[in-house]
Amino acid sequence: MFADTPRVEGSGPNGEPLYAAAWVREPYHDELAGYLSTAIGPGSGLIACRTAPGNRVEDCIVLGETPPGSRIARAAQAAAWQFLVRPPRIGGKPQVGEWVRIRIDYTDKPDGRAR
């Protein structure tokens, strides 16, 4: 049996529980580069997304970013259509439709992947 996914600080747009995202595959630098081209790094962005079938996410909202005004979270929100994350597990079962928190770190030196 798999362990339940931990809840994280914050909530979805209507107060829904928010869970830690578990990547199926982290996005490649090339998948994010065009979106992050308008952001100011280094820094990070936090978004919340509802999990969808096929390990996809939808309805993403911006939670915050560092530094403020860097546009990193907005870039992550725009790029999220290509993210692959596992739905959270509750009672050992995957729960498609629950909300997950995703963090994207943006550095000046691309390493092939983002978090």
Image (cartoon, rainbow, N blue to C red):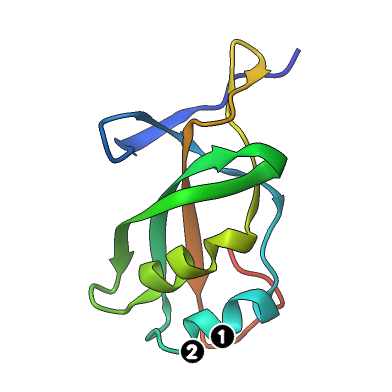
Q: Nearer the viewer, residue 99 or 103?
A: 99
Q: Nearer the viewer, residue 99 or 102?
A: 99
- Disc 2 packing (10 Å; few <14; some 14–19; many ≥20): few
Q: Is residue 61 above or below residue 85?
A: below
Q: Secondary structure at mark 2?
A: loop
Q: Position of residue 109 (x, y in %)?
A: 59, 87
Image quadrant occupied by the N terminus = top right
Amino acid carrying mark 2 in the image: Ser
Residue under label 2, please give it: 37
Q: Secondary structure at mark 1?
A: helix
**Does residue 18 appear left or right of residue 51 in this picture?**
left
**Does residue 13 appear left or right of residue 19 in this picture?**
left
**Does residue 84 appear left or right of residue 13 in this picture?**
right
Quick check: marks 2 and 1 in contact, CB under 8 Å?
A: yes
- Disc 1 packing (10 Å; few <14; some 14–19; many ≥20): few
Task: Tell me how far mark 2 sits from mark 1, CA to CA.
Answer: 5 Å
* Residue visible at 31% across and 79% down in the picture: 70
Amino acid carrying mark 1 in the image: Gly
Q: Is residue 19 above or below residue 28?
A: above
Residue under label 1, please give it: 34
Q: Nearer the viewer, residue 27 or 82?
A: 82
Q: Position of residue 87 (x, y in %)?
A: 61, 34
Image quadrant occupied by the C terminus = bottom right
Q: Is residue 38 above or below residue 95?
A: below
